[in-house]
Amino acid sequence: MAYRDLRDFLRTLERKDELRRISAEVDPVLEITEITDRAVKAGGPALLFERPKGSRIPAITNLVGTERRMNLALEVESLEEVADRVRSFIDVQSPQGILEKVKMLPKLAELGSFFPKTVRSGDCQEVVRTENFSLDYFPILKCWPQDGGRYITWPMVITKNPETGKRNVGCYRMQVFDGRTTGMHWQTQKHGAEHFRSARASNPGGKLEVAVAIGADPATALAGILPVPPDMDEFLFSGFLRREPVELVQCKTVDLAVPANTEVVLEGYVELSELATEGPFGDHTGFYSLEGQYPVFHIQCITHRKDPLYLTTIVGPPPQEDYFIGHAIERIFLPVMKMQYPEIVDVAMPAEGIFQNLMIVSIRKSYPGHARKIMNAIWSLGQAMFTKVVLVVDHDVNVQDSKEVVWKALCAIDPERDIQFVLGPVDTLDHAARRQDFGSKMGIDATRKWAEEGYYGPWPDEIKMDPATKKRVDAIWHQLKLDGSKKK
Ligand SMILES: Cc1cc2nc3c(=O)[nH]c(=O)nc-3n(C[C@H](O)[C@H](O)[C@H](O)COP(=O)(O)O)c2cc1C
Ligand SMILES: [Mn+2]
């Protein structure tokens, strides 16, 4: 059974000794970050701050900051289970023959059962505040010393495509400007920003309605982070992940719906003609992202549960909780990448590469220039377009092992021949790019080179001892007493 809501998941975490309650008063200004940062880096538990300074609402951090808790959140033993389910849906896409078509029907029915469902009332509206409300009520973090203020870091920002009416859910940080306004940091390539531009084009002086949901069952809370295609409802994907539809309730003052089990909902709008200075913010690159101009979110109503919890996360020097989220995304979406590019064997985004800086891809190479084709594929694949360095290796390199990758990839390149630069969109957070959002990217072809690619010598074999010798040494190894021999 899917988790009913955030507190249901917290109960499970507590039972499994994966949650620590902190009853001492702790300041949401910097202190919660410092504690959380240490907890994440130690592989520690989820944290429930019962007495954040200046607020009566408890704050939760490090919810899914280990692979184990991510598995608990998705109710699986390993992420491969989720990947297998994704694969099983992709496989039935193009049935051949009547038998395959018939077999497909239950699968389609199952898919249909994941669509969000509208319900009449929801716990998230136990309290409705259209007057006398303020964000000051919540334990919103100032994360790092040079941050421009407090930031809501794990919101589900919900908008509708003004042209198609389709919903989008994105996790975009929101800087608190005052009790009723925040920044809206949707980066220029993201779907929320697309909705904003499209609304502005048809009505420059108007508004775009926005609902922000904070804290839900874990699969739903993750929805806003998933890189799903434009106009695909992220809540459908949450329904798939939790194997039960997300229940949605209509907002009180805007024509949008939010997960009924949410802890806190902010309803309002952005003015299409208004921008304000947002930032700086200690970001997931491990550096501050600097000030920029972003839309302003005006809150006109806050609804929440009677005793709301405030879910938040910190980003900063890796690894942080977002590494485990990104890693889950990598595993879950790998089958989708493989469907489009079957030559891809595996993909890795090491924590230090902070997602957009480094993707290591292994392929089964079958024609000249194949590695370069894959680089271009990555740069045109959704948010993978941001990848600053794409490193392509042969199928027999284990991309999950950074040491093996460094060793084998560097042996395999003639840098001038094998490195390729392209220009294009880069991540907004890339402070080294020549311009915001625009810069260069690098592909490294570290596969074995072929004659057709201008390499005429024989490519050497990797050194491996022959099995017969290994066997003979195995037989006498014990007598040699070389295992664990320590000098005294
Ligand atoms: C903790 C966290 C904070 C994030 N903050 C932002 C942000 O401020 N702006 C942004 O554009 N993306 C941010 N992202 C990434 C987006 O959530 C992600 O790209 C998502 O897929 C965007 O949804 P969309 O494709 O519907 O626009 C953040 C991700 C995480 C995990
Ligand atoms: Mn989207």
Image (cartoon, rainbow, N blue to C red):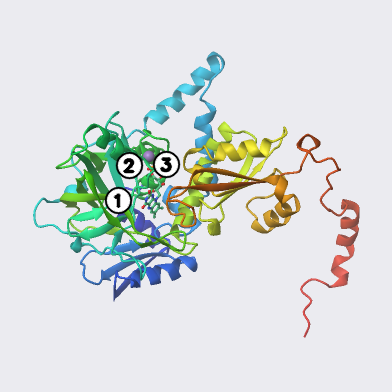
Labels 3, 2: front one: 2
**Residue drawn at (28%, 68%) of the image:** 50
Q: Is residue 39 above or below residue 352?
A: below
SS assignment at label 1: strand
Residue 455 lies, with reference to residue 356, above or below; the image says above
Which label sits on residue 8?
none
Judging depth in this view, the residue of 388 and 68 nearest the camera is: 388
Amino acid marked by disc 3: Leu
Is the residue under label 1 in contact with that under label 3 (CB below 8 Å)?
no
Apparent side of residue 460 relative to residue 367 in the rendered image (left or right):
right
Residue under circle 2?
192
Q: Residue furthest bottom?
A: 488
Neighbour class for label 1 at 10 Å: few (<14), some, many (≥20)? Answer: many
Label at residue 241? 3
Residue 305 or residue 12, whichever sits in front: 305
Type of the residue with mark 1: Tyr
If the picture is divided into quarters, which one holds ligand 2? top left
Residue 294 circle label: 1
Q: Position of residue 357 (x, y in %)?
A: 53, 53
Instruction: Name the foreground residue: 111 vs 377.
Output: 377
Q: Position of residue 40 (x, y in %)?
A: 45, 65
283 lies above or below 229 = below
Secondary structure at badge 3 equals helix
Mark 3 → mark 2, Cα distance in angstroms: 23 Å
Beta carbon at label 1 within 8 Å of ligand 1: no
Whichever of callouts 3 and 1 sits on the residue coming sooner in the sequence is 3
Q: Amino acid at mark 2?
A: Gly
Q: CA distance from mark 3 to mark 1?
A: 32 Å
The C terminus lies in quadrant: bottom right
Q: Quadrant of the N terminus?
A: top left
Tell me the quarter of the picture where residue 230 sits: top left
> What kind of element bears circle 2?
helix
